[in-house]
Image (cartoon, rainbow, N blue to C red):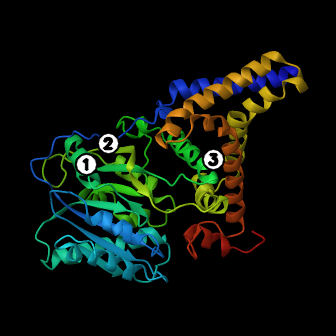
Amino acid sequence: MIWSVTAIAGFSLAIWLYLVALRGGFWRADRRLDEDLAAPPAWPAVVVLVPARDEAEVIGRAVAALLAQDYPGRFRIVLVDDHSRDGTAEAARHAAGTAGSEGTPERLSVVAARALPPGWSGKLWALREGLAEAEAVQLAGLDEAETAYLWLSDADIEHGTATLRRLVAKAEDQRLNLVSLMVALSCRGFWERLLIPPFIYFFQMLYPFAWVNDPRKGTAAAAGGCVLLRRDALARAGGFEAIRGELIDDCALARRIKDLPPTETEGAGGGGARGVWLGLTTTSRSIRPYRGLGEIRRMVARNAYTQLRHSPLLLLGTLIGLALTFLAPPLVGLSAELHGDKVAAILGFSAWSLMALSAVPTYRLYRQPVWLAAFLPLAAAFYSAMTLESALRHWRGAGGGWKGRVEPGAREVAQKPRDL
């Protein structure tokens, strides 16, 4: 018994030594968009694509922030109303009409998405509809500037005024095909303080940003709330059609873009560009609060099992891995009087300390007390339960449901006979 407790604690400590020393420095939370990048010789034209479904509560602030961008080049916004039932389109138009800047209402186009075709996720279909609208305007000769970039922005994000300018400067300066920012999530209530910084921390652990940004590494990821994308790179990657059924669409898009070889010629269309870049920001933030544990739980449970490729074996391995990595250290350390092994207790407390210290930069990013990092094991326990719930929802045919819509993967399960 004593040997097994010691082995568990020692194994947990070995995991944390590996994570801190050899996993791309994910815990540093230091990948930020440079503020002092040189301006390109000419600022390319950008089309902002905003998929929106039942976003009347937040769309006004999001649209106002987009219209207030200090981007020196030409840009316009295509907002796709994805069959909203709450007046999202009207709220967006009202925000544009009251923005107060000359020409801002004309800069915003609001289009209604057609019926969702089989095999498409709702967000990707909305983005495809927005791109089709931008292409139609271009073909009609109503926009004289050829679009070089697409900026994919969620409808609940309020961007800082310099965001677009800095995204484009980064892409142009480093010849990148994709630049993405993990925007700051709401972190005010009790459950948000407990679970949101760990969510960002776990994402960095799963996709170390240094590896994502290294063209020699196979790791690829993006944060769907803010993605700047070269239009020609999207076309070479097969367009939104190539990932139409993906529920974790941002990372699927990043994988396809990162796999693209650079084109042979330099030019305004992005010749010679290669690679993706992912970073953190506090100047662009989600304006949708998570009202209690239930909303966070639904956000995670919606796609967590998809991340595991709907594999029961990966689910089991993930739950065991989370237990050994996050739960075993405090349990072994705090139960020293029960098992009586001082060595195991020391190893457990050492692993727990290393875990908490590695999370401090992320808590500081979110301006939270650093002592909350000691409760990372508790957050991991909640996320383990949410992951299990995600699998149960998938098996019941309800996985991928979002805003009254069940996405493609869940529909396929729901249509299978119960005895299969």
Residue 395 visible at all: yes
The percent position of residue 109, horizontal first and vertical second, equals: 27, 77
For marks 2 and 3, give the CA distance.
26 Å
Which of marks 3 and 1 precedes in the sequence? Answer: 1
Secondary element at tag 2: loop
Residue 66 located left or right of residue 72: right
Disc 2: which residue: 33
Q: Disc 2 or disc 3, which is closer to the eye?
A: 3
Residue type marked 2: Leu
Q: What residue appears at the point 43 percent right and 52 percent down from the top-left corner?
A: 223
Quadrant hosting residue 175: top left
Horizontally, residue 316 falls left or right of residue 198, namely right
Residue at mark 1: 166
Residue 131 image label: none
Residue 133 x %, y %:
27, 76
Q: Are marks 2 and 1 in contact (CB under 8 Å)?
A: yes
Count of picture labels? 3
Quadrant assignment for the N terminus: top right
Does 315 sit left or right of 73 as displayed?
right
- Neighbourhood count class around disc 1 (C-alpha, 10 Å): few under 14, some 14–19, many 20 upward: many
In the image, residue 362 sits, relative to residue 283, either above or below, namely above
Identify the residue position indicated by label 3 in the image.
194
Of 382 and 223, which appears nearest the observer? 382
Q: Is 308 in front, or is 92?
A: 92
Q: Amino acid at mark 1?
A: Arg
Q: Inspect this view and state whether residue 259 appears.
A: no
Secondary structure under tag 3 reads helix
Mark toward the start of the polypeptide (2 vs 1): 2
Q: Residues within 10 Å of mark 2 (few under 14, many from 20)?
A: many
Mark 1 and mark 3: span between their CA atoms?
A: 31 Å
- Kind of residue at badge 3: Leu
